[in-house]
Image (cartoon, rainbow, N blue to C red):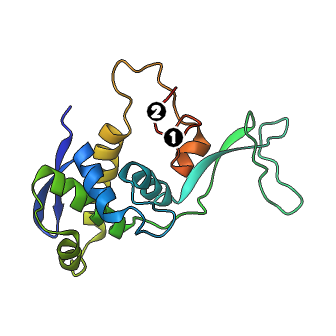
Amino acid sequence: MMNRVKASVDGREYELEASLLAADYYAEEFAGNLKAPYRGVLEDDMPVTFRRSRPTVEAYVMADKDGKPVKDDDGNLIPVEHGGVKVDVPNKEYRGVDGLALVRYVWAMGAAAGSIDERWEDFFERMSHVDFSTREMTQLFLVVILDLGGGHIFRKPEGHADAVDADDGQAAAGGSADAGGDGVAD
């Protein structure tokens, strides 16, 4: 499995790399410089972009004896941790595809692959005036978030079947699977 893909932005093709070098470039430029919920850590920010791009999310809610969702007196579904019924609910964080976040990822991953040799400021200035189409943004999202993110950055390495998976709360918060927060499962 290669950790490199090609992506097109404004008619230019870039090679992008999911690597520790990309994560390092990203952190050097953005750690502490972004507004919440972004942190400037590649492996924490990419899931935020994915989560916020989804108009609905799956949730488990209380169900009646027939398996239909139950609402409280105010008409709201009642969430449950275990059991219940799975439903799609509106995503309160929905923002559509975050183009600026994608451009940050492209810069860091392109710099790691050697296809982008500009400083972030210069790359951002050039990208600020790009006429992105919905199709191009969607393709960029698929390549960066799903192919590189899901296929490499967030994959479970072979031989780690017993590795600890983050639970939904930790994954949503960008936290690690262990209580120590150092990113290494005990």
- Residue at screen point 38% across, 61% down: 31
Amino acid type, residue under disc 2 in the picture: Val
Q: Residue 110: x and y, percent?
A: 17, 56
**Foreground residue, 152 or 138?**
152
Q: Is residue 29 left or right of residue 80?
A: left
118, above or below 151, in the image: below
In front here: 112 or 89? Answer: 112
Q: Which residue is mark 1?
A: 176
Q: Residues within 10 Å of mark 2 (few under 14, many from 20)?
A: few
Residue at mark 1 to residue at mark 2: CA–CA distance: 8 Å
Q: Nearer the viewer, mark 1 or mark 2?
A: 2
Position of 89 compared to 45: left or right? right
> Does label 1 or label 2 sit earlier along the sequence?
1
- Location of residue 30 (image quadrant): bottom left
Residue at the location (79% across, 50% down)?
Answer: 78
29 or 15: which is nearer to us? 29
- Determine whether label 1 and label 2 are within 8 Å by CB: yes
Q: Which residue is mark 2?
A: 184
Secondary structure at badge 1 equals loop
Q: Quadrant of residue 103?
A: bottom left
Q: Is residue 91 visible?
A: yes
Q: Percent x, y for residue 70? A: 82, 48
Q: Is residue 139 visible?
A: no
